[in-house]
Image (spheres, grey):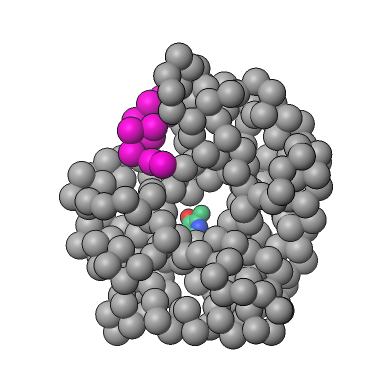
Amino acid sequence: MSVAENLAAVRERIAAACARSGRDPADVRIVAVSKTQPAAAVVEAIAAGVDAIGENRVQEAAVKRPLVTGPTPWHLIGPLQRNKARAALGLFDLIETIDRPELADRIEGMLAGGSRTLPVFLEVNVGGEAAKSGVATGDAATLADHVVRRCPHLRLAGVMTVPPYDPDPGRSRGHFAALRTLAQGLAARLGVAALELSMGMSEDFEVAVEEGATLVRLGRIVFGERRPVA
Ligand SMILES: *Cc1c(COP(=O)(O)O)cnc(C)c1O
């Protein structure tokens, strides 16, 4: 199956999940997660109309992005170390993984004085897993306030999560619902209409769509199994 065929099948499944939950499929966008895949695969995905490209490592994006042209935005979906922040700003259009005030401050400091405003999402550790990155659900409002009040060159545009791994996607439903509830509370607190909800991967995107995902991050179901080296 080609990337285009895989995406066509994914879009049908998104449409069905929208039909089950009374949503408009136009409100669900696809972030094609191209980690370990070559730049040629990214080009195929863009040709097939994905809404964004997701990469989880700065170094890997640095290799691929110069080989890919066009306006499709690139999202950083993996953890960002302080010393990679400047490189990330040159490679990504949106950072989905803001999880602490220090990281927001670091990026703000690099953008200060310029005219660029970077859209960002807060990564939320909805499952409360000790080993996982992401701000704790209970600390998300404080982090959101920090970004909005202290970081004028960042625009808080959404939240993302990776729920605890579970072979039964139905068991992720509660975590997705929790992120939606959190986002609704943050939007009300900040006085914005809505925040993007980045949730759902290859195994559980239909459940995420039923629970309100506006961005699904899809890797293997679009590109096939991950490859040993980028
Ligand atoms: C790899 C990755 C994905 C995509 O995973 P698949 O299971 O291949 O769809 C989504 N989100 C994040 C944060 C990832 O690291």
Residue 108 is left or right of residue 45, and the answer is: right
In the displayed structure, would residue 84 be above or below residue 165?
Answer: above
From the image, which quarter does the C terminus lie in?
Answer: bottom left
Across the whole image, how many numbered discs are drawn on residues?
A: 0
| Residue ID at (65%, 20%) | 150
What secondary structure is the stretch in magenta mostly built from?
helix
Query: In which quadrant of the rendered view does residue 190 lie?
Result: top right
Q: Can residue 206 be seen here? A: yes
In the displayed structure, would residue 66 be above or below residue 145?
Answer: below
Query: In which quadrant of the rendered view does residue 100 lie?
Result: top right
Q: Residue 132: where, in percent of width, then height?
A: 62, 47
Residue 91 magenta-highlighted? yes
The front one of 29 and 86 is 29
Residue 102 magenta-highlighted? no
The front one of 80 and 10 is 10
Q: Residue 25: where, in percent of width, then height?
A: 57, 74
From the image, which quarter does the N terminus lie in?
Answer: bottom left
Residue 219 is left or right of residue 46, and the answer is: right
Residue 102 is left or right of residue 20, and the answer is: left
In the displayed structure, would residue 70 be above or below residue 102?
Answer: below
Residues rendered magenta in the picture: 82-93
Q: Residue 172: where, in percent of width, then height?
A: 69, 68
| Residue ID at (60%, 44%) | 157
Q: Residue 227: where, in percent of width, then height?
A: 29, 64
The front one of 22 and 224 is 22
Query: In which quadrant of the rendered view does residue 35 lie?
Result: bottom left
| Residue ID at (79%, 56%) | 181
Q: Can residue 227 be seen here? A: no
